[in-house]
Amino acid sequence: MKKLLALGLFFLLSNCSTVPVTGRRQLSLLPASQLQQMSYTSYKQFLDTNKVVGNGSNVETVRRVGVRIQKAVETYMAQNNLTNQLEGFAWEFNVVESPQVNAWCMPGGKVVVYTGILPITQTETGLAVVMGHEIAHAIAKHGDERMSESLLANGLLQGGQIAAGANPKVINQLLLQAVGAGAQLTMLSHSRKQESEADRIGLIFMAMAGYNPSEAVPFWERMAAKSGGNKPPEFLSTHPSDERRIRDIQGLLPEASKYYSK
Ligand SMILES: [Zn+2]
């Protein structure tokens, strides 16, 4: 029994990493390089089978915001001796034509923004709220956590690797779910803990990228108006209610504002 406990502890300690900004310890069952590999295959497949917007002002704005946030992330990680966590990243920012109110970032920095969210982001700063938040999920390795959990639940892990006979289609599906690509409304797919974490980290990244983090409040008010009354009450959902989220974000603004210079 003691031996088993020791073994379990060793397993946990050797498979933990730390979330930037919040310092939370998290379990990661797969090497980042393996997740990135899956992510890059999945992303390419997604782009091949969806309507990618090739050019125009929306694409230009998404790429400009993306690159500015990428640079902010790189600066933050360098300042905190965490640059090794960006190893293997291959950032990419694409716009997909779809009525879905959604955006996501896969492990390794592969971002998609759906045209359906643009009427709610409205401005470049509004877009920075969304992209900062989604990129924060990736930097905090939330997709990795969820992917580890679902692989484990589906019996697809063997000795810290994806099981040899695992169906690539199933893996692809799990990864899309893990980053919230299937959700109708953005940011409804992660746990409350992950959402709060992405809000906090995302505000810092957008502020460092030169976007006023206080714009997150009107953005979430517009999101709340959009999602309207057809949501389950907060106690039934793992997602923070809009009012609670807006209140929490107001509480996070003093911290984020320190990173913002006009
Ligand atoms: Zn989210």
Image (spheres, rainbow, N blue to C red):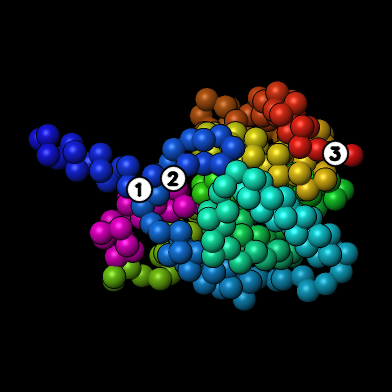
Q: Find disc 1 in the rendering and name its residue.
A: 15
- Is 257 displayed left or right of 92 in the figure? right
Indicate the position of residue 207 as horizontal and vertical percent values.
77, 41
Q: At label 2, which amino acid type do we have? A: Ser
Tag on residue 261? 3
Q: Are marks 1 and 2 in contact (CB under 8 Å)?
A: no
Does residue 180 appear in this view?
no
Give the residue drawn at x 31%, y 42%: 12
At label 2, counting other C-alpha atoms closer than 10 Å, the crowd grade (few under 14, some 14-19, many 20 or more) is some
- Is 173 displayed left or right of 125 in the figure? left
Give the residue drawn at x 63%, y 29%: 241
Q: Which residues are magenta?
A: 143-163
Give the residue drawn at x 83%, y 72%: 55
Question: Mark 1 or mark 3, which is nearer the start of the sequence?
Answer: 1
Query: Who is closer to the viewer here, 244 or 36?
Result: 36
Q: Find disc 2 in the rendering and name its residue.
A: 17
